[in-house]
């Protein structure tokens, strides 16, 4: 089967805190490494009560110190929040600490509300419209002979793999134009998935970084040893998504039996769209659903997400996903 990787938001569950989330993140990364996952990516979000991965590079360093082989990366760094030089230095530092293991995924959304975005950048004027220019600046910092007078130390000459992330057609177009690998956030925004893949593949221009198109897709997995258990553990992420869309973000709630039947038709429609890029069920059901998604999309790689309240249940879900890939 297609290669599998892990996307982690370091979720903060109700009744818990960020310190425990970081322990769980390291635990999941160590298990993922043993189970054969290719990458472990953390996502940058700010001001979210249920997400602890705001200082993404710092947390990646923590994970790197506790693992040996698995690739580590950002899925992604929201570049409008930062100076490209700072990101080059941070990921140059990570690559120097964990050589040959670092990826850098770049997104153009703020990963927060606009008030938080302003607090992050203060009086700087950079915004999403400058994203292509910021990406080029960042790529230049990693080159052997940067065109800019300023040097990223560490960073220069390290050639860290850079990905473009997206949930719309813009990212697909930019990744194709620059000849970079493309990761689509289908795990939470599947609406433009097939169009984005088509545009990326049709318009891809080979580059020194990548000879042919490479697509990684976000995919939710909620797996358990019984179907009823799988649907129960999935209800935490479903509640969190409904709360977020309703303007009530909070910590990851405990699972709720029959949650889908307890909400109205508009919320059910939102979740059905979300679950179009998900596998829920037993090991056999998950294997079949993952395979069907890969056949539909032609994905080169799946980035598996799974917001699950209980840490042991989350580990088991990822273990089942790994077993499904190996059995296919």
Image (spheres, rainbow, N blue to C red):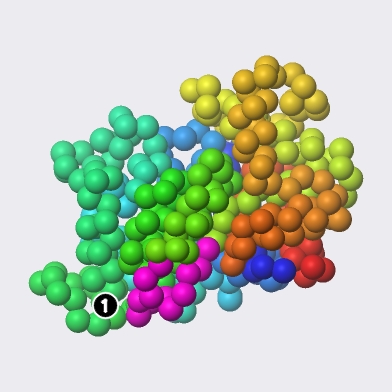
Quadrant containing the C terminus is: bottom right
* Quarter where residue 308 is shown: top right
Residue 177 or 257: which is nearer the viewer?
177
Q: Where is residue 17 in the image (x, y as percent from the top left)?
A: 56, 39
Main secondary-structure element of the magenta-colored stretch? loop
Q: How many other residues sit within 10 Å of disc 1, few (<14), some (14-19) or many (≥20)? A: some
Q: Is residue 270 magenta?
A: no
Q: Is residue 214 magenta?
A: yes
Can you name the residue that lies furthest to the left here? 149
User: Where does the magenta region start and end?
Assistant: 204-215
Q: Position of residue 10 (x, y in %)?
A: 56, 48
Q: Where is residue 282 in the image (x, y as percent from the top left)?
A: 85, 50
Secondary element under disc 1, as helix, strand or loop, is loop
Left or right, 47 with respect to 85, comes to: right
* Quarter where residue 240 is shown: top right
Can you name the residue that lies furthest to the right here? 226
Left or right, 46 with respect to 35, comes to: left
Can you name the residue that lies furthest to the front here? 202
Residue 247 or 135: which is nearer the viewer?
135
Give the residue at x 59% y 46%: 187
From the image, tell me which residue sits under label 1. Answer: 143
Give the residue at x 69% y 64%: 31
Q: Where is residue 196 in the image (x, y as percent from the top left)?
A: 48, 52
Residue 222 can be seen, yes or no:
yes
Quadrant containing the N terminus is: bottom right
Residue 66 can be seen, yes or no:
no
Tally of numbered discs: 1
């Amino acid at each position: 089967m297609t290669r599998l990787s892990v996307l982690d938001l370091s979720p903060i569950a109700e009744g818990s805190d960020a310190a425990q989330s970081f322990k769980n993140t390291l635990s999941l990364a160590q298990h993922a490494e043993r189970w054969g996952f290719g990458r472990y990516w953390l996502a940058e979000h700010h001001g979210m009560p249920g997400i602890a991965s705001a200082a993404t590079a710092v947390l990646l360093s923590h994970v790197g110190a506790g693992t040996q082989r698995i690739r580590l990366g950002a899925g992604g760094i929201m570049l409008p929040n930062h100076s490209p030089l700072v990101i080059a230095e941070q990921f140059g530092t990570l690559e120097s600490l964990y050589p040959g293991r670092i990826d850098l995924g770049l997104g153009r959304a703020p990963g927060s509300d606009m008030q938080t975005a302003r607090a992050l950048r203060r009086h700087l004027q950079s915004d999403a419209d400058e994203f292509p220019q910021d990406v080029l600046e960042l790529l230049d910092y990693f080159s052997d002979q940067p065109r800019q007078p300023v040097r990223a130390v560490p960073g220069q000459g390290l050639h860290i793999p850079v990905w473009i992330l997206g949930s719309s057609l813009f990212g697909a177009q930019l990744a194709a134009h620059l000849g970079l690998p493309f990761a689509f956030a289908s795990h939470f925004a599947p609406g433009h998935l097939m169009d984005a893949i088509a545009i990326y593949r049709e318009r891809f221009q080979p580059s020194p970084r990548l000879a042919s198109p490479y697509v990684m897709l976000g995919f939710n997995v909620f797996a358990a040893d019984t179907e009823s258990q799988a649907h129960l553990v999935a209800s935490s992420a479903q509640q969190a998504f409904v709360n977020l869309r309703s303007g009530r973000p909070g910590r990851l709630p405990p699972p709720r039996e029959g949650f889908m039947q307890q909400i109205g038709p508009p919320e059910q429609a939102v979740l059905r769209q979300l679950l179009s890029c998900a596998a829920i069920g037993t090991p056999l059901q998950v294997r079949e659903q993952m395979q069907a998604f890969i056949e539909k999309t032609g994905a080169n790689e799946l980035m598996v997400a799974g917001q699950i309240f209980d840490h042991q249940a989350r580990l088991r879900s990822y273990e089942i996903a790994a077993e499904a890939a190996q059995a296919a």
